Amino acid sequence: MTAGGEAKAAADEAFARGAYPHVVNGATADKAATLDAIAAAMSFPDYFGHNLDALYDMLTDLSWLPAGEHVLIWTGSDALRKADPKTYLAIRSVLSDAQRALGPSGGKADSWRLTVVLADS
């Protein structure tokens, strides 16, 4: 299955369970472009600081989005992994930490949850 096919399947699965999918076109080979792509996909507010600490802060807040599960689907992450493995691992670490911080909340209607999916083939 292609990355595009994986992303569509992940988005369809998110919709089916009532989650909000956010597809990140991450086929970029640098940190700034990857952060911009994540910010665009998640509709980050203008005050996003464009660094890893700010990425974590945004992903563990999500208060500008409707409550519920938000699924960040990162397509093309392999491009960054190949071009800049250290940055790739740092961003993956932030995504994992944020996902853990916003883990299952017991279904409270006024809470946010983050799920991260890598859609690479």
Image (cartoon, rainbow, N blue to C red):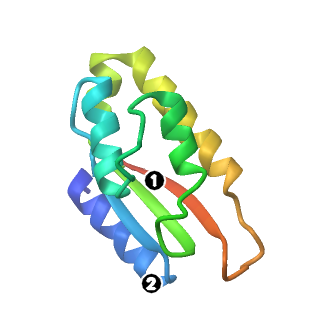
Give the image quarter of residue 49. Answer: top left
The image position of residue 20, as x and y in percent, is 43, 72
Mark 1 element type: strand
The image position of residue 23, as x and y in percent, is 31, 58
In this orientation, which residue lies closer to the viewer: 1 or 57? 57
Q: Is residue 55 visible?
A: yes
Identify which residue is drawn at 35% across, 25% down. Answer: 81
Badge number at residue 16: 2
Is residue 67 left or right of 79 when viewed as pictured? right
The image position of residue 85, as x and y in percent, is 39, 17
Number of marks drawn: 2
Badge 2 amino acid: Ala
The disc, 2 or 1, on the residue closer to the chain's N-terminal end is 2
Rendered-image quadrant of the C terminus: top left
Is residue 43 left or right of 115 when viewed as pictured? left
The residue beneath circle 1 is 117
| For residue 96, above or below residue 78 | below
Identify which residue is drawn at 57% across, 42% down. Answer: 57
Badge 1 amino acid: Val
Give the image quarter of residue 32. Answer: top left
Q: Residues within 10 Å of mark 2 (few under 14, many from 20)?
A: few
Identify which residue is drawn at 66% across, 78% down. Answer: 110
Badge number at residue 15: none
The image position of residue 119, as x and y in percent, is 35, 51
